[in-house]
Amino acid sequence: MTNRLLSKFARYVLLFVIGVALTGCVTYTSIRKHPDFANNSRVINTVAMLPPVVEYVHLVFDGDNERMASKEASIASTLQEAIPSSFKSYGYKISKTNLNEKITNDPDLGYELEQIRKAYVTASSELYGKGMVDEKESAGFKVAIGPIVNQFADIADADGLIMVRYYGFTKSDGLMTKEVVGNVLLAGLTGTYYQPARNGSAIEVALIDGNNGDVLWSNVKSVAYDGSYAIVSSALTPLPRNVTNTHLPAEEALPADASEKMAAVDVKGCEKALPDDFNQTYFRVGKTLYDARAFAPAKLCFEKSTELDEDADDKHDAYFHLGMMYELGQGIDADDEAAKQLYAKAGLLEEPNANEKID
């Protein structure tokens, strides 16, 4: 049942993205907020992430598509690391309870989780049935999945639960050839050629009140590749900071555990080549520093990643984070043009100068 429901989500996201392209209006958004959360009258301090629902598919010419279980497991692991880390950087406390372990050891909890997922599918259709909405409308969504969430919130001793759905795909050579030929024929009629994407991914992230099941905040994002870190950062960048946490660091300050993170990776580590026995990539080191809000050394690591990391996803994610830093002015002067070109290199935009070096 979960696989079928997620496949519906995959089809929906494709239509949703098409809708985004057709609006062409920057005042429209994919973000949804409950009014109480938008005006800070609903406070969430501690959150716990439910096991994510992940579908990754190898799309082939004849339509006999194949689920890629090992890839799904890898993505799920990345999401369970990246999403709590991002919430923590926005001032939320992360529950120490291992819900995966609890569910594995209790079949009844597994059943309850499936009920929550089904309820959220219904809620999501209410949230996104209209597609993109004007920013003024985004803070008026009163959608709930009900008190079915109570049990998990109580187990995790959390105020809120994080629901995540992820869909990704990669295309076979045969399917790519078919699409290229089709697009060439279409270009003959329209005068415009679109290069089909070999990979793609979409994510839906929601914060749910652990008491009554209200969906307090949600967002949907998609990218033209399957980099998990970048799509998480893209989806969560608009997440409201938890301003009620008195220990929340200032925008440019380091959180209390920053020194521990720094010791683990060495702030100056990216100024020289990483040791051969160091089981990290430049992007992973940069992401750790970025989450600790040490933007200057993070930027250096991301730049090294684009040149030296062998993994294509790491390179894409590094370009995305550099673009975000330029867009938001994190440790550097804000520069929208540089941000756009970096986003294009990350596969988020179609830019004519996407392959030009950014000085």
Image (cartoon, rainbow, N blue to C red):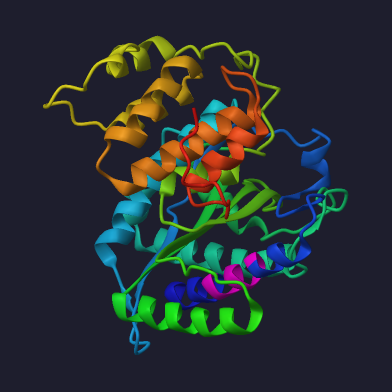
Is 172 left or right of 245, judged from the image as shown? left
| Quadrant in the picture for residue 328 | top right
Q: Which residues are magenta?
A: 10-17
Judge from the rendering whether residue 131 lies leftward or rightward of residue 251; answer left or right.
Answer: right
Nearer to the camera, 346 or 287:
346
Q: Main secondary structure of the magenta part?
A: helix
Q: Quadrant of residue 307?
A: top left
Residue located at (78% from left, 50% from top): 26
272 magenta-colored: no
> Taking 83 as reference, is 65 above or below it?
below
Q: What quarter of the picture does the N terminus occupy?
A: bottom left
Nearest the viewer among 191 and 150 is: 191
350 w.r.t. 299: above or below: below
| Percent of width and height locating residue 345 | 48, 45
Task: Using the rendered image of the protein, determine whether residue 269 is visible from the camera's viewpoint.
Answer: yes
At horizontal 58% and vertical 82% (from top left) the residue drawn is 188
Name the one closer to the observer, 115 or 137.
Answer: 137
Residue 308: x %, y % from top left? 27, 34
> Disc count in the image?
0
